Amino acid sequence: MPRKILLDCDPGHDDAVAMVLAHGDPRVEVVGVTTVGGNQTLEKVTRNALAVATAIGMTEAPIAAGCGRPLVRTPELAAQVHGESGLGGVVLPEPVVALDPRHGVQLIIDTIMAADPGEITLVPTGPLTNIALAARLEPRIVERVREVVLMGGGQHIGNVTPVAEFNVHTDPEAAHVVFNEPWPITMVGLDLTHQALATPEVVADLGAVPGPVTDLLLSIIGFYASAYRDVRGFAAPPLHDPCAVAYCIDPSIVAAEPVPLDVELGGHLTTGMTVADFRRPAPEGCHTKVATVLDAGAFWAAVKGALVRLQNPSTTRAGEPR
Ligand code: PIR
Ligand code: CA
């Protein structure tokens, strides 16, 4: 049985790769996609989600637009890395997938409440605004989800400030709500995702799979790599968001350790920092884990496997006869 995941995202180059991996790997099933303002405005990232879904044949899962701005703070976009469109440098088809009329927060709640307890895993890869509001609007989801596997935060590093990561820093109050609800949470933060580097060797290996989804993936990585080189001085760019999907596909790809986690809200230099308390072994019943070590070989093999399946529609769920 594939693990059922709901992607809450702000595509975004690496969010788009997360969609490719999630749709192309039979060990997970995408039961819904919700969007959130983050890398770009809600309008732009929602259009990107619909267009990427169209390009990869992900036509079954409902896609709904969620919150357009953080709970408290002024939106900060990531146009430097993701471009004005949110998927700079990427040519996308006109969406044929229709937007679900529900608010994204409602789609999250409906999906979890309609499923069996423990069936749905939430995979947020943008600011946590929708997830926080869903927990407030329908508190019963907290004990019903299997796990929240989020890309965000970092134990030892930040990217938008020395100690804060973009998704948490954009809406730290929402992250605070999410981290302080008692559901199982795995934080796939920068310490982990900076091990998922799309090196020239990786790109050459993926490029060996012929087909249109490979072309899309290479154009995504191409723009993102030059942005990461120019803005951050990275020789190869980290593909953050698919790491959270990889953990759901096979937890042996991403090692994680239990540790208490919280979010700084009132810092002078540290707002949006995630704080992991490693002073002693995690207490009994600790509900938070932090991802530590990526099996990069297994990770890229999963991405490649997804590509192979998506080029050949007869082997994908989306391509199965109805
Ligand atoms: C990546 C992101 C934002 C800013 C930069 N500089 C790089 C986005 C990615 O989509 C990912 O989800 C997360 N936020 C990494 O911080
Ligand atoms: Ca993202």
Image (cartoon, rainbow, N blue to C red):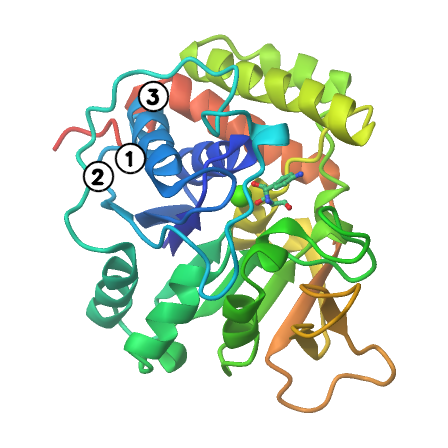
Q: Mark 2 vs mark 1: which is more N-terminal?
A: 2
Depicted 104 relative to depicted 317: above or below: below
Depth-wise, is mark 1 or mark 3 nearer the camera? 3
Mark 1, residue position: 317
Q: Is mark 2 within 8 Å of ligand 2?
A: no
Q: Quadrant of residue 85?
A: top left
Q: CA distance from mark 2 to mark 1?
A: 9 Å
Residue at image location 37% in from the left, 75% down from the top: 135
Task: Tell me the amino acid under the disc marked 1.
Answer: Arg
Camera-side residue: 231 or 318? 231
Q: Mark 3 vs mark 2: which is more N-terminal?
A: 3
Task: Tell me the amino acid under the disc marked 3.
Answer: Ala
127 vs 322, left or right, is right
Could you classify mark 2 by the number of other residues whose Cα lies within 10 Å: few (under 14), some (14-19), or many (20 or more)? Answer: few
112 vs 36, left or right, is left
One can see residue 212 in this view:
yes
Mark 2, residue position: 60
Could you classify mark 1 by the number of other residues whose Cα lies within 10 Å: few (under 14), some (14-19), or many (20 or more)? Answer: some
Q: Are marks 2 and 1 in contact (CB under 8 Å)?
A: yes
Quadrant of the frame with the N terminus? bottom left
Q: CA distance from mark 1 to mark 3?
A: 15 Å
Q: Position of residue 63 (x, y in %)?
A: 26, 44
